[in-house]
Amino acid sequence: MTGDHPTSPALADALAAGTVVLDGGMSNQLRAQGHDLADGLWSARLLLSEPEAVTRAHLAYYEAGADVAITASYQATFEGFARHGVGRGRAAELLTLSVTVAREAARRARLRGAVRPLWVAASAGPYGAMLADGSEYRGRYGLTVAELERFHRPRLEVLAAAGPDVLALETVPDTDEATALLRAVRGLGVPAWLSYTVDGDRTRAGQPLVDAFALAAEVDEVIAVGVNCCAPRDADHAVATAARVTGKPVVVYPNSGETWDAATHGWRGPATFTPERVLGWRAAGARLVGGCCRVGPGTIGAVAGVLAGG
């Protein structure tokens, strides 16, 4: 499947032709719509209880100017659903639903006048996201690469079968998990992007980004490599490094720049994500550009405008 319409180009072809706009944070948009996400399933809970809310969140980003919607499956795993009493069969249905509701949002956007291609990226978050204890920002879970591959592969198989345009292997904190994910996507028939969460010039687990990005350089399934869920200033360096090391298009979607305070369970500090910043990322090789936590439709609309005008 290519985009939300049979005549839409494949995402990889679109990246060769220009820059594609990603959406922003799913959780902040759902909260803006009045939903409480305070449990271990996070935004994936609404796939179970109110999938229409997820459709509306995707639609808000499409209508703001995003070309790609990232599904609400970041924290959706067989193990995580099981902790909430959801069996394996139903969990597979919910993973599939995450792609279906994003496609529905694209359909509605087209009915409302969108004429550009609209794509769906199926999110696969790290093992630590399932744990819901913040360990996705540390990595090094004490599992082997083989164990991590066994964790990720079944979920990726279900997501791939749902027909997304790309698999978003995102917020990856270390090279062990990246290696596992790169093995797990082989043979699925769906392209992928690999996106680390970083601190300065290293992964969250402390490995040099040069080494981390190099893992994907020769993986045919990977159409873009980059970073997400990091500070905008860290993205500045990472984009140029990813482009140089891999020769592939770069994906970049950092947070707003505010800092999460675990003690107060709130965000503090100023936002440093400015739409004009994306021009530097594009010049350095970024071809998939958007936002992550605390970046909403308004900012994504401004990003789309800057890229179109710049």
Image: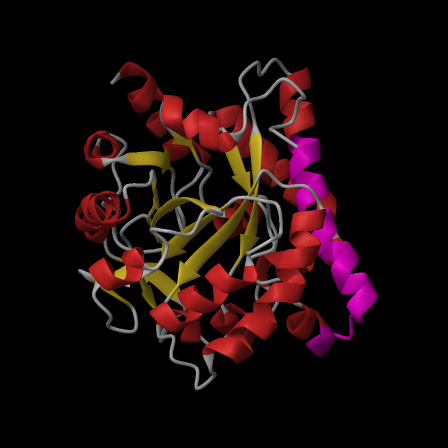
Q: Residue furthest bottom?
A: 142
- Colour scheme in use: secondary structure
Q: In the picture, residue 303 is in which quadrant?
A: top left
282 or 266: nearer the viewer: 282
116 or 274: nearer the viewer: 116
Q: Is residue 92 a member of the stretch shown in magenta? A: yes
Relative to residue 240, is residue 278 depicted above or below? Answer: above
Relative to residue 22, is residue 237 depicted above or below? Answer: below
237 or 23: nearer the viewer: 237
The C terminus - image quarter: top left
Highlighted range, magenta: 82-105
x%, y% of residue 14?
A: 45, 25
Let me know if residue 255 appears in the view.
no
Task: Determine the main secondary structure of the stretch shown in magenta.
Answer: helix
Indicate left or right for 52 with 260 as reference.
right
The N terminus - image quarter: top right
x%, y% of residue 34?
A: 60, 48
Let me know if residue 3 appears in the view.
yes
Indicate left or right for 84 with 227 as reference.
right
x%, y% of residue 74?
A: 55, 58
Q: In the picture, residue 203 is in which quadrant?
A: bottom left
Q: Is residue 36 a member of the stretch shown in magenta? A: no
Q: Residue at x 25, y 48 (%)?
A: 242
Q: Residue at x 76, y 60 (%)?
A: 92
Q: Residue at x 28, y 32 (%)?
A: 275
